[in-house]
Amino acid sequence: MNQPTSNNQEIISVSEVNSLAKGILERDLSNIWIQGEISSFTAHSSGHWYFTIKDKNSSLSCVMFKFENQNILFEPKVGDELILNGNVGIYAPTGKYQFNVKHIEVFGEGALLKAYEELKKKLEYEGLFEASNKKDFPTMPKSIAVITSETGAVLRDIVTVLRRRSPTLVVTLIESQVQGRDADKFIVQAIKTANKRKDFDLIILARGGGSIEDLWCFNMESVAREIFKSRLPIVSAIGHETDFTISDFVADLRAPTPSAAAELISENHFNLPDSLERITNEIIKIISNKINYIDDNVKNLLKLIRHPGDKLRETTQQIDNYEMRIKNSLMNLILKKQRFRARDIHLKILLSSN
């Protein structure tokens, strides 16, 4: 109970002062944005972050509890220039006021873009982007792994395209976080899991569009190196057509969208009926040409090999000719004999008359 002073002034406790101050601060300084540079940072084993931000003239203690920071893409470090959203409050046991952080952003995109360019330059120098290191894709894949979130439109879009273009293709989801501070760890593990399977022909790594912060896990060095080490060829299908991540450069193939990735890997399946028709027509043409060639050869041979009846008739005619020649020869012999006989008689008559 509060006791009045000698001059009838009410006396309140320390706790009450802190409670009143806390109420005033949280009411008047809530949902505000502060810009500052981190001068100290501690990630407690509880998962909470305790840090101090400063400007040229002042500093401010900050706390960001685990349930608030688990969706932040990065862990801040000393020297980072940040924009913080939250409310000013008082930690009653010590009476110190602090900023309770709800959201963190890097000041501008400059810092993220700088980190992006530095990693890109590093990996390019090491040869991770070289075309000679890209793995070949199977012409007719039978089974694929899709690494993405279980929720959202990405998986549905991929499956819809593949069912229409290649209904026999087996699609297996390997669920992974694709946004948030620990998403890179989940993606790395998902790639490892897919490579342990013997039935997969390739991997689609997919996510829908978003800001540079949303897509930042695909710009992490750990993800890039795991993509490079993958035994299976990987299609990177991150964001929209204008979004480029480090994963896109390292992957064996980059697709502008998840749906486009599905179309690319099913192209040969989709064109198979046309290919079969084209091949069938080519085979028919080849066989037809061969038949025509054989037919022409047979006709030419038939011209050289006459019908047996023709040969028989020719032989019969030859026999007839031989027979006529023999008869003629006999007649000639008879005539000659008759002439000789007549001559002999004539000579005898002449001799007797003398």
Image: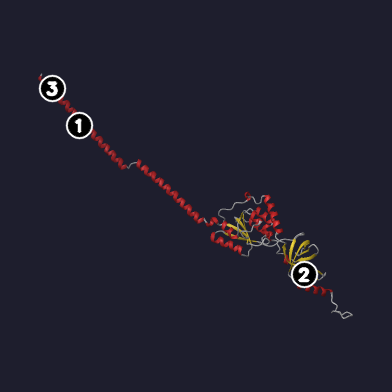
Q: Position of residue 274 (x, y in %)?
A: 49, 55
Q: Is residue 132 left or right of residue 336?
A: right
Residue bearing the label numbered 1: 331
| Residue 83 pos. (x, y %) | 73, 64
Residue ID for mark 3: 348
Report the amino acid beneath label 2: Val
Specify whether residue 167 is in view: no
Decide if residue 248 is in sight here: yes
Location of residue 234 by image quarter: bottom right
Nearest to viewer (mark 1 / mark 2): 2
Dot 1 or dot 2: first in sequence order is 2
Front one among 318 and 118: 118
**For the point 47% across and 53% down, which residue is it?**
280
Look at 76% across and 72% down and name the residue there.
28
**Front residue (pair 102, 58):** 58
Q: Are marks 3 and 1 in contact (CB under 8 Å)?
A: no
What separation in Å lies between label 3 and label 1 (alpha carbons)? 26 Å
Q: Which residue is mark 2?
A: 88
Colouring: secondary structure
Q: Position of residue 308 (x, y in %)?
A: 32, 42
What's under tag 1, amino acid-wise?
A: Met
Q: Quadrant of residue 118?
A: bottom right
